[in-house]
Image: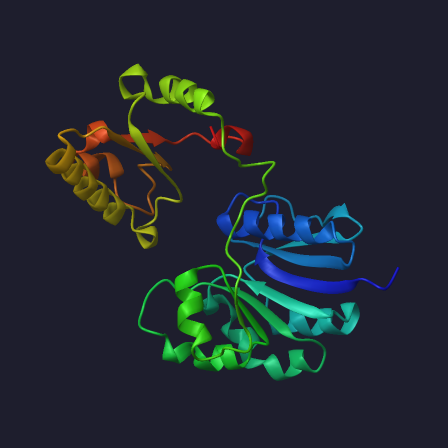
């Protein structure tokens, strides 16, 4: 068996419930099955309850840290671990310090970035960051379309995904049964949309509600009914976001929005 390639990861803690954390976990678990990779992660969070190193297995070891690291941490890690790849995954603002020392990193290994940029126009001020990165994997097609025009040789579209054993289509009979249990019998024939996210202003939940109102108005105008329910799996009263119950009432769509605020396991989320 050839030596496994060692990857140092800077991202949300892979055992956390954040979007970046869960996607990191799915990615690592999938690559571990190939038996060609070994991962060492600095698992980021604002604060951890426990800072003990987590040995998931011999090829997946996580060290919890506050934030996403610093120059000294990377210098020590490059010298001791001698990685084949440095993999970063989150917003660029957390890694300005890393890009400023990219010449030191490149003496040891390439930098791979799983990246998203949500809107046009193309962010020219990020060009120096893209130039400092050896591979840019975009988890949004919009991001991919923007960046591939400028850096076609190193830009790929690698969207977020969920393993089939966690999330997969249910039989129609089960769907109807769960709709009755969760939404009630009076909505079993409703079209259902779902939004699973943090209720934070930067996620623009009020824009979603405004768009849902437009959709309901279209249904009523063109089909004579408003048989549609939006499930928002989030905390409608999160201090980082707007009061979503008040917003839905102001838009007069509160009867067509269902809030799911309790934490649930992956198996139940798909239902």
Farthest residue toward the left?
Answer: 221
Q: Quadrant of the N terminus?
A: bottom right
Residue at 62 percent of width and 52 percent of height: 27
From where the camera sits, is residue 251 visible? Answer: no
What x and y, as percent, mark residue 11? 57, 58
At which x and y percent is residue 4?
Answer: 80, 62
- On the question of residue 191 being in view, the answer is yes
The vertical placement of 226 against 36, above or below, is above
* 62 left or right of 210 in image: right
Nearest to the observer: residue 79 or residue 90: 90
Task: Tell me which residue sits at (41%, 69%) in the image.
Answer: 145
Q: Nearer the viewer, residue 71 or 20?
A: 20
Q: How many marks?
A: 0
- Give me the residue at 50% from left, 33% from top: 169
User: Is the residue 139 above or below the residue 198 in the image?
Assistant: below
Up-down relation of residue 202 to residue 120 (above or below): above
Residue 160's place in the image compared with 149, above or below, is above
Question: In the rendering, at what x and y percent does residue 246 appear?
Answer: 20, 36
Q: Is residue 28 left or right of residue 95?
A: right
Q: Which quadrant holds residue 258?
A: top left
């Amino acid at each position: 068996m050839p030596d496994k390639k060692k990857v140092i990861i800077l991202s949300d803690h892979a055992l956390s419930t954040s979007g970046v954390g869960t996607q990191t976990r799915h990615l690592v678990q999938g690559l571990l099955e190939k038996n060609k990779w070994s991962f060492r992660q600095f698992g980021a969070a604002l604060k951890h309850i426990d800072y003990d190193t987590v040995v998931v297995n011999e090829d997946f070891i996580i060290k919890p840290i506050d934030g996403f690291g610093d120059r000294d941490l990377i210098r020590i890690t490059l010298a001791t671990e001698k990685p084949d790849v440095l993999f970063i995954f989150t917003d660029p603002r957390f890694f300005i310090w890393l890009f400023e020392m990219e010449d030191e990193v490149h003496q040891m290994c390439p930098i791979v970035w799983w990246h998203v940029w949500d809107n046009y126009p193309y962010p020219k001020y990020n060009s120096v960051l893209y130039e400092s990165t050896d591979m840019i994997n975009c988890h949004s097609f919009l991001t991919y379309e923007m960046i591939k025009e400028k850096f076609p040789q190193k830009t790929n579209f690698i969207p977020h995904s969920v393993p089939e054993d966690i999330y997969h289509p249910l039989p129609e009979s089960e769907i109807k049964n769960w709709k009755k249990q969760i939404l009630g019998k009076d909505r079993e024939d409703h079209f259902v949309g779902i939004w699973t996210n943090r209720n934070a202003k930067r996620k623009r939940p009020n824009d979603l509600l405004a768009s849902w109102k437009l959709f309901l108005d279209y249904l009523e105008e063109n089909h004579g009914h408003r048989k549609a329910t939006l499930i928002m799996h989030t905390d409608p009263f999160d201090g980082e976001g707007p009061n979503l119950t008040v917003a839905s009432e102001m838009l007069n769509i509160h009867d067509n929005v269902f809030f799911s605020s309790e934490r649930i396991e992956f198996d139940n989320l798909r239902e």
